[in-house]
């Protein structure tokens, strides 16, 4: 199901195809589910769950929050 969310990092809107039951997605987005997302959507990747929670795409994570360089002593 194609889902539109606005990123909490950039404020940009993104579409993402989430491979889950549309009814479950609708319930999650409506806020009627009171369960941890990893329990409600165990079949989804961490990236898809993060998108449903915060609208953040994997590309946005890499751009806005790059991994720290372990060799950097600053």
Image: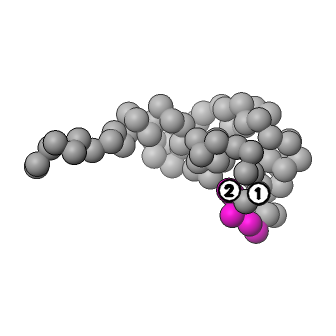
- Looking at the rendered structure, the secondary structure element under dot 1 is helix
> Which residue appears farthest toward the right when viewing the image?
23
The residue under the point 51% across, 49% down is 8
Judged from this view, the residue extending furthest toward the left is 74
Would you say the magenta stretch is mainly helix, strand or loop?
A: loop
Q: Which type of secondary structure does the marked residue at label 2 adopt?
A: helix
- For residue 18, side relative to residue 24 (left or right): left
Q: Is residue 46 above or below residue 37?
A: above
Residues packed near mark 1 inside 10 Å, few (<14), some (14 to 19) or many (20 plus): some
Whether residue 49 appears in this view of the structure is yes
Q: Mark 1 near mark 2, Cβ–Cβ under 8 Å?
A: yes
Q: Which mark is residue 8?
A: none
**Which quarter of the figure has residue 55?**
top right
Task: Say which residue label 2 marks.
Answer: 38
**Is residue 44 a member of the stretch shown in magenta?**
no
Q: Position of residue 18 (x, y in %)?
A: 73, 36
Q: CA distance from mark 1 to mark 2?
A: 6 Å
Task: Find residue 33 and report its horizontal and vertical position in percent.
Answer: 79, 63
| Rendered residue at 16%/42% (across/down) | 71
Residue at the disc numbered 1: 40
Give the colouring mode of the picture.
one colour
Q: Which residues are magenta?
A: 34-38
Q: Count of labels shown? A: 2
* Residue 53 in the image, given as x and y percentages of width and height: 62, 52
Residue 13 lies in what quarter of the image? top right
Task: Please tell me which residue is depicted at 46% across the width and 36% down the height of the picture.
Answer: 60
Residue 44 at x, y percent in the picture: 70, 43
Q: Quadrant of the N terminus?
A: top right
Callout 2 crowding tier (Cα within 10 Å): few <14, some 14–19, many ≥20: few
């Amino acid at each position: 199901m194609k889902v539109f969310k606005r990123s909490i990092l950039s404020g940009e809107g993104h579409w993402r195809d989430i491979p889950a039951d549309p009814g479950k997605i609708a319930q999650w987005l409506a806020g009627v589910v009171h369960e941890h997302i990893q329990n409600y959507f165990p079949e989804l990747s961490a990236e898809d769950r993060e998108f449903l929670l915060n609208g953040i795409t994997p590309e946005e994570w890499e751009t806005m929050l790059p991994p720290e360089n372990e060799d950097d002593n600053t």
